[in-house]
């Protein structure tokens, strides 16, 4: 082993030990591994070298930067608008400022080295642009990146934090939309908590966070009588009924008094607004039954070879109205849910009527065929008799 | 009425034609039923002409409108569903009957002297019927037809040098697009009908000129028995039999269209991934499966190219069969066994795809 290789190994080991002692969630890498990873790094592509981040110690050997200095090291370039403009004029340059407002940033300023720094989430030597699906901060990878620390009970306990949110989110309707359906606009950890400025939303802010996507629900809730009541009781609005990380698909049955979900979490049938809940539930149940019936009859018509596009369009309208009616439930009143459900019911009935017309047409065609068959059979019999007579004559 | 007949007789050879038909006789024997296959094919062709002309009134041959126009025909035009379904069913039944006609002529050795040209014109008509099916399949512009056409038009591409120009010519570009649809439409409704009409006239005239062929085995039996050959007057006996068969075919078409209206499927999306289960019409399945089963390399050559060449040589051999077959006892036997093997092969390959073995 040459003295140069030995020095590189020592540097690598020192760097690894430093990383381990700071409890970085990422595994330590050797100098050679770091060099190999850097070949695909966005910084390498931009023309930067090791010296851009590492202090040169001896010849072409470099020391690992101190963990606490990493945010400011990265911010040295990434907070410099004039410098960053040369690489990407669209790139934001407030990452460091926002990081310092985050729980991570506040803790590291206090000297707590176990919290996340830039390289824990973005990587150190193989950094990809955020829009690259290989990046650990690409929407479909964010939850796994956060989970490296936040699902680790040993790491979370000293901070008095639960380690269940990543698993809860993974079982949520949001995770299904993002990971199964591939909808990258679906929320992951950073959507609600922020990325560089990551922090848990306060109770009074939860609804504002959810409202970023669920605009109509939030608007209806703010105007509803529940808003003042929740504020008085310091209830975290959306989270009260839907939970925070383990958000499942709401069911119409939540509008009721059975079990311990939806209204039944807090109410029984003796409350003043029980009639409203029952009425809303009946409207949605009637609409769902009509949609199911129309779906069934349209499928039968299609199986018989009929084209029922009008019916399908009406059925889509009914389904859309049901979505709106379900959203309208957040008004905690008879209206506008009843109106929406009535429109949906009308559309579902139109869909069913289209299916019935098509099925009647099938019967009409078969009757027509029967009549035509009688004529054809009569003609065939006549022909048969004529042929027989000719044969006899011969 | 008499004056009209006289007027017509002075201007057209109606009397001569009727006289010819009155004196014409069709052989009667145990294989006579196969004589009706040609007539049935003609009936289905006439149905295609009539229903195709009706569909032309509403069909629009562009990628943006083709699917919607067929949908309009099926859902809005009075009896449009019936016309379109009959057109589709009749096309398939015509291909089926044409194959029955081909193999019955082959097995009964009806291609022998002096009917060589009748056979050759028939072979050309078979090719044109298949071309009708191939071009017509794409016209509704649905997903399955789009991808099947993409696969089908790719096949000649395996031929060295001229393969890609042929693909380009078929598609009207490097890929199947709206331009291909317009091209197929033109071929389907103008070029093919024109050629088929001429060839069909030649084929039917030749059949009338030479009469129906009696199979060699029946000829031998007649010679051995010493009795005169049985026959049936063409007019009115044979014509009435034919009419009986055509009426049955019409009833079958009506029943199929009423109980199993031809599906339209979903509109073709040129950017969508190819759906599972792409396959051509049933009459191309045996070739489709052969191409799938042939090894990537055969004797150092591209397997697909070898298969395409084999199909071409097979087609040529069939076309020139009357000139190749020396009409001896042995050659007749070879032709019968080869034809039987071909039929079995086609059925087996088709069954393999239909049962999912070809997936």
Image (cartoon, coloured by chain):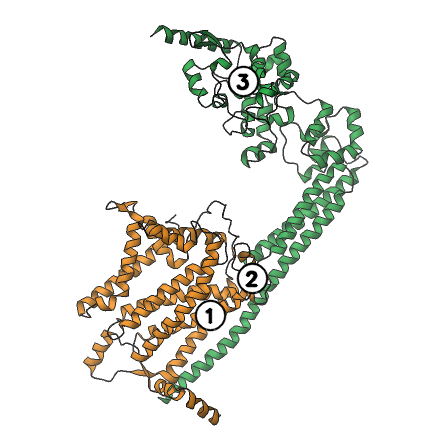
Chain colours: A green, B orange
On screen, B309 above or below B199? above
Residue occupying image coordinates x 57% and y 56%: A300
Quarter-of-image position of residue B202: bottom left
Residue beneath the point at 44% across and 73% down: B248
How many numbered discs, if any? 3
Q: In this orientation, which residue lies closer to the viewer: A260 or A198?
A: A198
Q: CA distance from mark 3 to mark 2?
A: 61 Å
The chain that hosts pointer 1 is: B
Residue at numbered disc 2: B74
Relative to the observer, which residue lies in front, A82 or B303?
Answer: A82
Which of pointers 1 and 2 lies earlier in the amino acid sequence? 1
Q: Residues within 10 Å of mark 2 (few under 14, many from 20)?
A: many
The tag on residue B49 is 1
Q: Secondary structure at mark 2?
A: helix
**Relative height, residue B136 to residue A40 (above, below):** below
Tell me the crowding category of disc 1: few under 14, some 14 to 19, or many 20 or more residues within 10 angstroms, Cα based.
Answer: some
Question: Which quadrant of the rendered structure holds the N terminus of chain A?
Answer: top left
According to the image, label 3 marks what residue? A120
Relative height, residue B176 to residue A337 (above, below) = below
Say if residue B28 shows up in the picture.
Answer: no
Q: Are marks 3 and 2 on the same chain?
A: no
Q: Tell which subunit mark 2 falls on.
A: B
On the image, which quarter does residue A265 sit in? top right
Which mark lies nearer to you, 1 or 2?
1
Q: For label 3, count other residues whose C-alpha is less than 10 Å away and answer few (under 14), some (14-19) or many (20+).
A: some
Q: Chain of mark 3?
A: A
| Residue B349 spot, x, y in % from top left | 34, 54
């Amino acid at each position: 082993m040459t003295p140069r290789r030995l020095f590189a190994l020592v540097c690598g080991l020192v760097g690894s030990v430093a990383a381990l002692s700071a409890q970085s969630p990422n595994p330590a890498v050797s100098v050679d591994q770091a060099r190999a990873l850097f070949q695909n790094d966005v910084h390498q592509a931009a023309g930067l070298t090791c010296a851009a981040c590492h202090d040169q110690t001896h010849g072409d050997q470099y020391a690992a930067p101190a963990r606490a200095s990493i945010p400011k090291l990265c911010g040295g370039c990434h907070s410099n608008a004039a410098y960053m403009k040369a690489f990407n004029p669209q790139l934001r340059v407030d990452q460091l400022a926002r990081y310092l407002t985050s729980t991570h940033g506040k803790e590291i300023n206090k000297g707590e080295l176990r919290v996340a720094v830039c390289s824990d989430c973005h990587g150190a030597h193989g950094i990809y642009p955020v829009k690259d699906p290989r990046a650990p901060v690409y929407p479909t990878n964010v939850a796994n990146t956060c989970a490296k620390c936040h699902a680790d009970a040993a790491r979370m306990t000293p901070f008095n934090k639960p380690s269940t949110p990543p698993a809860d989110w993974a079982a949520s309707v949001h995770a299904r939309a993002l990971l199964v359906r591939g909808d990258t606009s679906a929320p992951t950890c950073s959507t609600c908590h922020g990325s560089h400025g990551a922090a848990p939303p306060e109770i009074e802010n939860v609804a504002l966070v959810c409202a970023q996507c669920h605009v109509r629900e939030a608007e209806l809730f703010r105007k509803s009588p529940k808003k003042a009541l929740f504020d008085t009781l310091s209830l975290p609005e959306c989270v009260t009924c839907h939970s925070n990380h383990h958000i499942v698909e709401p069911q119409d049955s939540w509008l009721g008094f059975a079990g311990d979900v939806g209204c039944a979490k807090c109410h029984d049938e003796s409350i003043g607004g029980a009639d409203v809940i029952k009425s809303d539930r009946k409207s949605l149940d009637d609409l769902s039954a009509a949609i199911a019936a129309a779906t069934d009859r349209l499928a039968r018509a299609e199986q018989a070879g009929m084209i029922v596009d009008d019916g399908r369009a009406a059925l889509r309208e009914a389904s859309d109205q049901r979505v709106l009616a379900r959203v309208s439930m957040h008004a905690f009143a008879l209206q506008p849910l009843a109106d929406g459900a009535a429109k949906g019911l009308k559309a579902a009935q139109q869909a069913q009527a289209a299916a019935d017309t098509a099925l009647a047409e099938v019967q009409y065609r078969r009757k027509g065929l029967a009549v035509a068959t009688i004529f054809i059979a009569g003609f065939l019999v006549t022909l048969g008799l004529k042929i027989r007579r000719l044969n006899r004559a011969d | 009425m008499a004056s009209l007949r006289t007027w017509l007789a002075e201007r057209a050879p109606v009397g001569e034609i009727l006289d010819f038909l009155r004196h014409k006789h069709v052989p009667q024997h145990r294989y006579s039923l196969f004589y009706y296959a040609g007539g049935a094919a003609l009936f289905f062709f006439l149905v295609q002409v009539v229903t195709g002309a009706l569909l032309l009134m509403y069909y629009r041959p562009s990628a943006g409108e083709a699917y919607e126009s067929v949908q309009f025909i099926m859902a809005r035009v009075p009896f449009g569903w019936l016309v379109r379904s009959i057109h589709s069913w009749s096309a398939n039944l015509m291909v089926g009957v044409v194959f029955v006609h081909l193999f019955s002529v082959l097995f009964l050795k009806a291609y022998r002297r002096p009917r060589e040209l009748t056979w050759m014109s028939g072979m050309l008509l078979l090719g044109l019927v298949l071309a009708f099916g191939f071009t017509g399949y794409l016209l509704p512009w649905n997903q399955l037809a789009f991808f099947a056409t993409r696969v089908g038009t790719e096949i000649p591409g395996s031929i060295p040098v001229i393969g890609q120009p042929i693909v380009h010519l078929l598609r009207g570009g490097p890929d199947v697009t709206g331009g291909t649809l317009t091209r197929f439409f033109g071929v389907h409704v103008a070029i093919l009908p024109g050629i088929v009409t001429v060839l069909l006239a030649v084929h039917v005239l030749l059949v009338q000129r030479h009469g129906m062929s009696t199979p060699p085995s029946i000829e031998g039996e007649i010679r051995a028995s010493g009795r005169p050959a049985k026959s049936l007057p063409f007019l009115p006996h044979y014509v009435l039999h034919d009419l009986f068969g055509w009426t049955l075919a019409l009833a079958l078409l009506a029943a199929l269209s009423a109980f199993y209206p031809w599906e339209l499927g979903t509109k073709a999306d040129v950017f969508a991934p190819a759906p599972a289960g792409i396959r051509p019409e049933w009459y191309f399945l045996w070739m489709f499966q052969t191409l799938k089963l042939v090894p990537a390399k055969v004797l150092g050559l591209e397997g697909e190219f070898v298969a395409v060449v084999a199909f071409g040589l097979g087609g040529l051999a069939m076309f020139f069969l009357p000139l190749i077959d020396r009409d001896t006892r042995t050659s007749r036997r070879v032709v019968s066994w080869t034809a039987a093997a071909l039929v079995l092969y086609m059925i087996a390959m088709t069954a393999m795809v239909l049962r999912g073995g070809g997936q």
